[in-house]
Image: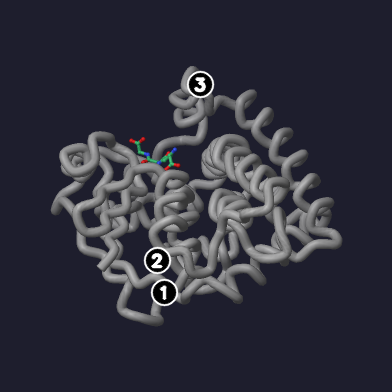
Amino acid sequence: MLELYQFEGSHYSEKVRLILDYKNLPYRKVGVIPGVGQLDLFRLSGQYQVPVLRDGDEVIPDSTAIAKYLDAKYPERPIIPNDPKEKGLCLMMEAWADESIGLNARKAMIGAFNQHPNFRKAILPVAAPDFLKHIIGAIPAEVLSFLGTGVGFGADAVKAAHNILNQNLEALCLLLEDSPYLAAEYPTLADFAVAGLSMYLKFPADNYIDLPESICGKGVPGLADNPAYRLFFDWRDRLYADYRRLKTSGKSATVSPISPTPNSISIE
Ligand SMILES: N[C@@H](CCC(=O)N[C@@H](CS)C(=O)NCC(=O)O)C(=O)O
């Protein structure tokens, strides 16, 4: 069976989970513990980041490489169009989702949980021990903001991320005004990348991802609750309802930690 090495709260992992579900491919989730688990991941894949797909002897890191591998190896329900224009649009939008929506959504979410300690506690890795969540929750917002400065998560960087995301969401609403999908008449990699990478803007309300219930349906204030972007979030809800499996259905949602104990903290 396919194995997905992942963090449950990772938006790049979510992009791959959406594709696996769309293609009806059963898979087993292997939860990587931030820190020590990533050392095991390095031994397996030669790099430290999730997602990593294992298909028998094949080990594929990187969500884009995984998407292309899956479409080539399991061509049923293709996600990369053949038509040149559609294919070009699809690949361009996928890269845009990864690099613009994904990176800026992470900054905007960190900005939001600098302001809201409960949101911050809720989003720490589900596997993190309670005492760790307590300690992180107790760190004042100004300290986190200070720590963030210099690595791109200070107040100015968060504001810049909001500006970019506002334009991204406006563009998506315009694109979706008269079309059910972003790059073709059927769902493609562009749709799954945009849906997955926008997870931190607003977590899906239903039971798709194994995260604390307190954050389901919640998101970055000013973006998640902005009526101007309703069309986009409604579109994403429909995509999930049509193609994403609920976490309770099927046997594919087993999490078995790649490593028993965490040795560092990560926000994803
Ligand atoms: N380009 C990669 C990005 C993956 C990525 O940024 N993964 C994050 C989780 S969302 C990660 O593993 N972070 C831990 C780290 O960098 O140590 C992809 O598309 O898969």
Q: Choose between 165 and 18: the one closer to the eye.
A: 18
Position of 219 compared to 250: left or right?
A: right
Query: Counting residues from the N terminus, which is met first, the one under dot 2 or under dot 1?
Result: 2
- Ligand 1's image quarter is top left
- Which numbered circle lies on residue 210? 2
At x 50%, y 21%, the residue is 149
Crowd band around label 2 with a 10 angstrom C-alpha radius: few (<14), some (14–19), many (20+): some
Residue at label 1?
247
At x 49%, y 55%, the residue is 15
Q: Do the residues labelled 2 and 1 touch (CB within 8 Å)?
A: yes
Residue 199 appears in the rendering: no
Query: In the image, what residue type sits under mark 1?
Result: Lys
The image shows residue 163 at horizontal and vertical percentages of 73, 33
At x 36%, y 48%, the residue is 51
Query: In the image, what residue type sits under mark 2?
Result: Asp
Query: Counting residues from the N terminus, which is met first, the one under dot 3 or under dot 2?
Result: 3
Q: Quadrant of residue 247?
A: bottom left
| SS at mark 2 in the image | loop
Task: Report the Cα–Cα distance between label 3 and label 2.
Answer: 30 Å
| SS at mark 1 in the image | loop
Task: Report the Cα–Cα distance between label 1 and label 3.
Answer: 36 Å
